[in-house]
Image: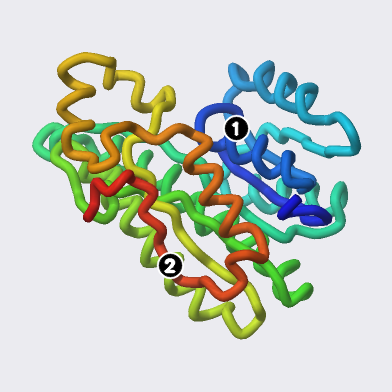
């Protein structure tokens, strides 16, 4: 029970990595507030609540947009009213709009930057006040190995995820004296809806051939790293990016 007594926020958590993080945090005793943005995710959010709200576990979903600054303010205030504090914030909301730079539109670029990078600013800006008051907190930002390596056809995604790494390091330097830690996770290829186009076969095998561990990550692999950074096991770790990529970025 590594998170017993702690309260966590996880954005973009109705599926994939975010859902796995919510489940892992609840398993380890945390009270969890998670966000989702689309109406189509509402039914899934209710299912997550019903599955996890047993034996004293408290998990609550909120329909809100992490890319909207005012919405984040309302969200964080609602969580504080409901749970009383915020110990951990996992900025997981993200999208990809892959395209070659020659064909990429300004609108595609802006959408990726807003959802992936501005959302991290929006949420971090809101949670640091209660964390500073408590003189404790862990901020965990979901970057990507693509933000470290770059990738053809993903210039907007790579730029947004690289920006998260720089932001993470700066926040760590600003808030370390208040005992607030800021770290990033850079997953490699993870088996989620976002990577469903990498079907088993020649395409998938080509990517796996470049991964020393020879497989894609499961969402639980990433959730385990997030659990470590949220827990007191990582109390002396800040400003770091953990590449959970199976060795892809060696």
The residue closer to the viewer here, 38 or 85, is 85
User: Quick one: quadrant of the C terminus?
Assistant: bottom left
Residue at the image point whose x is 53% and y is 67% from the top:
182
Kind of element beneath mark 2: loop
User: Relative to 107, does residue 186 appear above or below in the rendering?
Assistant: below
Instruction: Provide the residue designation for mark 1.
Output: 19
Res 223 quadrant in image: top right
Which mark is first along the chain, 1 or 2?
Answer: 1
Instruction: Give the image location of residue 20, x and y in percent.
Output: 58, 34
Classify mark 2: residues with Cα within 10 Å, few (<14), some (14-19) or many (20+).
Answer: some
Residue at the image point whose x is 71% and y is 72% from the top:
136
User: Relative to 204, does residue 211 appear above or below in the rendering?
Assistant: below
Residue lying at the far bottom in this picture: please name it: 177
Kind of element beneath mark 1: helix
Instruction: Give the image location of residue 215, x and y in percent.
Output: 31, 32
The residue closer to the viewer here, 61 or 27, is 27
Res 163 quadrant in image: bottom left
Would you say 45 lies left or right of 167 here? right
Would you say 187 lies left or right of 146 here? right
* Residue 67 seen: no
Instruction: Provide the residue designation for mark 2.
Output: 240
Q: Marks 2 and 1, Cα distance to the nearest angstrom?
A: 23 Å
Residue at the image point whose x is 27% and y is 15% from the top:
200
Instruction: Give the image location of residue 159, x and y in percent.
Output: 27, 52
Residue lying at the far front in this picture: please name it: 213
* Residue 97 seen: yes
């Amino acid at each position: 029970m590594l998170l017993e007594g702690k309260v966590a926020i996880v954005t973009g958590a109705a599926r994939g990595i975010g859902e796995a993080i919510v489940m892992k945090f609840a398993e380890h005793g945390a009270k969890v507030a998670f966000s989702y943005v689309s109406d189509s995710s509402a039914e899934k959010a209710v299912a997550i609540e019903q599955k996890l709200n047993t034996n004293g576990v408290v998990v609550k979903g909120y329909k809100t947009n992490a890319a909207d600054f005012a919405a984040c303010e309302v969200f964080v205030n609602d969580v504080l009213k409901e749970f009383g504090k915020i110990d951990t914030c996992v900025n997981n909301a993200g999208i990809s709009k892959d395209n070659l730079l020659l064909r990429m539109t300004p609108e595609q670029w802006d959408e990726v930057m807003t959802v992936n990078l501005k959302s991290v600013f929006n949420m971090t800006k809101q949670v640091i006040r209660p964390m500073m008051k408590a003189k404790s907190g862990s901020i965990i930002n979901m970057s990507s190995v693509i933000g470290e390596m770059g990738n053809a056809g993903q210039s907007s995604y790579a730029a947004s995820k690289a920006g998260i790494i720089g932001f993470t390091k700066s926040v760590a330097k600003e808030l370390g004296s208040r005992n607030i830690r800021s770290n990033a996770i850079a997953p490699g290829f993870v088996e989620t809806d976002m990577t469903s186009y990498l079907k088993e076969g020649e395409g998938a095998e080509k990517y796996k051939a470049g991964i020393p561990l020879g497989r894609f990550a499961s969402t639980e692999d990433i959730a385990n790293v997030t659990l470590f950074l949220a827990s007191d096991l990582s109390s002396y770790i800040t400003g770091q990016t953990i590449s959970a990529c199976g060795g892809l970025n060696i």
